[in-house]
Image: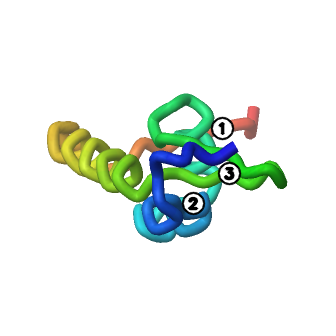
Amino acid sequence: MRNRSHTDNDLITLGEAAKRAGRSYSWAWSKAAVGRLDKHQDEQGRIFVTAQSVAAAIARDTAQRRRAPTRGGHLRLIIDNTK
């Protein structure tokens, strides 16, 4: 059930959250499932999240990507099964 302290303008669908973050629907769903996004559910079972929590998750992910060391090249697995 929706938290009445949030207006309808504050709540967005998981699809909209994914679009704003430039990520997949499953990203938004999993973030909501583990509590990284403030999740609210209506009477029909639809899941909404707050726009503010989505913006915060985007900021966290961006900061984390900046801190991550850049890796050069690619790792390739080569299997020789000719013997």
Up the image or down, 25 lies above or below 27; here it is below
Q: Nearer the viewer, mark 2 or mark 1?
A: 2
Question: Secondary structure under badge 1?
Answer: loop
The answer to which of marks 2 and 3 sits earlier in the sequence is: 2
Give x and y (percent) for residue 12.
53, 63
Question: Secondary structure under badge 2?
Answer: loop
According to the image, label 2 marks what residue? 24
According to the image, label 1 marks what residue? 80
Q: Is residue 19 left or right of residue 65?
A: right
Report how far apart the C-alphas of labels 2 and 1 lie in the structure.
Answer: 36 Å
Q: Is residue 18 visible?
A: no
Towards the viewer: 17 or 26:
17
Which image quadrant: the C terminus? top right
Towards the viewer: 34 or 40:
40
Give x and y (percent) for residue 36.
45, 35
Q: Is residue 26 left or right of residue 9?
A: right
- Amino acid type at image mark 2: Ser
Q: Is residue 74 left or right of residue 77?
A: left
The answer to which of marks 2 and 1 sits earlier in the sequence is: 2
Towards the viewer: 18 or 50:
50
According to the image, label 3 marks what residue? 47
Q: Nearer the viewer, mark 3 or mark 1?
A: 3
Q: Is residue 25 left or right of residue 66?
A: right
Towards the viewer: 33 or 78:
33
The answer to which of marks 3 and 1 sits earlier in the sequence is: 3
- Residue under the point 54% across and 68% down: 16
- Residue under the point 60% across and 58% down: 14
Q: Nearer the viewer, mark 2 or mark 3?
A: 3
Question: Secondary structure under badge 3?
Answer: strand
